[in-house]
Amino acid sequence: MTATIVEGKALLETVIASVVAGIGVTAVFAIAIWGVARSIDYSRDERPLAAGAAGAVAAFALLATTAALVVGILVMTGG
Amino acid sequence: MSSDVILVIVVGTALAFDFTNGFHDTANVVATSISTGAARPRVAIAMAALLNFAGAFISISVAATVANDVVNADVITPTIVFAGLIGAIAWNLITWYFGLPSSSSHALIGGVVGSAVAAAGFDAVLAEGLVGKVLIPAVVAPLLAFLVAGISIAIIYRVVGGERPGTVNRAFKYGQVVSGGLLALAHGTNDAQKTMGVITLALIANGSLGAGADPPFWVIFSAATAIALGTYSGGWRIIKTTGTRIIKMDAAQGFSSQGAGSAVILASTHFGFPLSTTHVINGGIMGAGAAKRLSAVRWGVAGNIVTAWVLTLPAAAGIGALAYGITHVFGDGALGPVVVTVASLALIAALFMRRAERGAPVAAEGA
């Protein structure tokens, strides 16, 4: 019984971790791509300020994606 | 002396199983990247092999589950482990021969459980561990990957749907280099550990390790090497199956399915759940396809995967039990495993020759 409860808790944590990591990282990476695409388009339209802002969003989102991956690997290797 | 001979045979058989696991799972790991054009086949396979090797060193939680939580190590002998491995290999070969997509992981666990029951009765099985750590995660994980990939791709289309397709596609291809690498790492860490667990179980059964011991470094290193070499050798003939037979994907779908697969496998590995990585990866692919358009998924192929999924555990258990029975006919010494090994090798050679004459199977198999 105790073992089942422990497995149930671990399974729930697996579900939560999978959802947060899988959907979260993908969403943040999609924002990065949106930022890159917008930045290119704004540059073409000669709107440097908007291009810079979109570029900053892209850079921040890319950084967040990388950080999430590094944290994920660190958690894994931590046992 | 006799038990040492059996142990050597068990270790050799387990590593051969690990090699074949990597061999036919190459398709599952790299097909998505290749089919969307994110990576060239040779580069994708080399990268997958390297990351499979690295992944094997990340964790030992799954190995501990296989070695300690599925069958009662007190009643297990190296011969039981050997018969279990034969059950798993035989089921993999049968499904390969008929082109059925199956799970090496479930075959391995089914084989060991079947031979343990044949040798020592149902008391040999740790029911809570088997249900809680194997059976329930086996159902939950592919569905979870399906859901995560589906939601992910919906978000992606929402966020970048209005942007230029060329830019978006190119960016997701770059993303797939990372997500594909992560999937290879995840595959290596979950699948190589099953072999480590089985070898550790045999070492405990032989008295070479104490009960509850972790896998020694040489076991981790040899399992990592075997799966990496198998991956590099690659299942070239079945590479197309996972990538294009279930759905035709764009780079964003490839990224979301690989991301979902990696997240589910890595999280499960962290908690010691031995999964079928094949089922998780296919679940992710189907989720990414179904979220875009339900008819994009070839549900017939998906149905075959589910059928093989349900059949694998009991079938491998039955063959494992039979293998133990045959081995036991020759007594408790090394003769039984030697005879069964020679007979198995002859059968494998015959199957390969017959298959070569009839043409290659097309379905993906895997862990």
Image: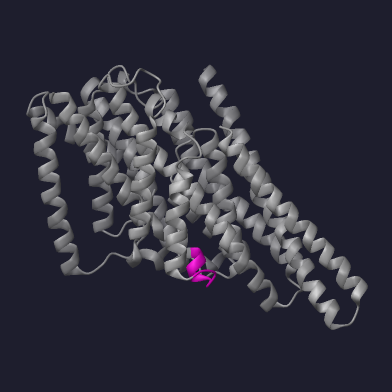
Does residue B44 sit above or below A23 in this rendering? below
Residue B172: where, in percent of width, then height? 63, 67
Q: Is residue B236 visible?
A: yes
Is residue B152 found left or right of B199 in the rendered image?
Answer: right
Nearest to the observer: residue B307 or residue B274:
B274
Q: Count the marks.
A: 0
Q: Residue furthest bottom?
A: A45
Magenta includes B36? yes
**Residue B164, located in which quarter of the rendered image?**
bottom right
Q: Is residue A55 left or right of residue B199?
A: right
Looking at the image, which residue is at 31% across and 18% down? B123
* x and y, in percent, of residue B203 in the image: 29, 26
Does residue B290 appear in this view? no
Q: Would residue B96 be found to the left or right of residue A68 on screen?
A: left
Residue B2 point in image, percent of width and height: 13, 25
Can you say whether B160 is above or below A8 in the image?
below
Looking at the picture, the colour scheme in use is one colour
Is B187 inside the magenta-drawn segment? no
For the residue pair B127 and B234, the one nearer the viewer reads as: B234
Q: Which quarter of the figure is the N terminus of chain B placed in?
A: top left
Q: Which span of residues is magenta-colored? A: B32-39
Residue B55 located left or right of residue B227: right
Quadrant assignment, res B109: top left
Q: Nearer the viewer, residue B358 or B34?
A: B34
Residue B301 appears at what percent x and percent y? 41, 61
Residue at 16 percent across and 52 percent down: it is B348
User: Looking at the image, which is closer to me, A57 or B313?
Assistant: A57
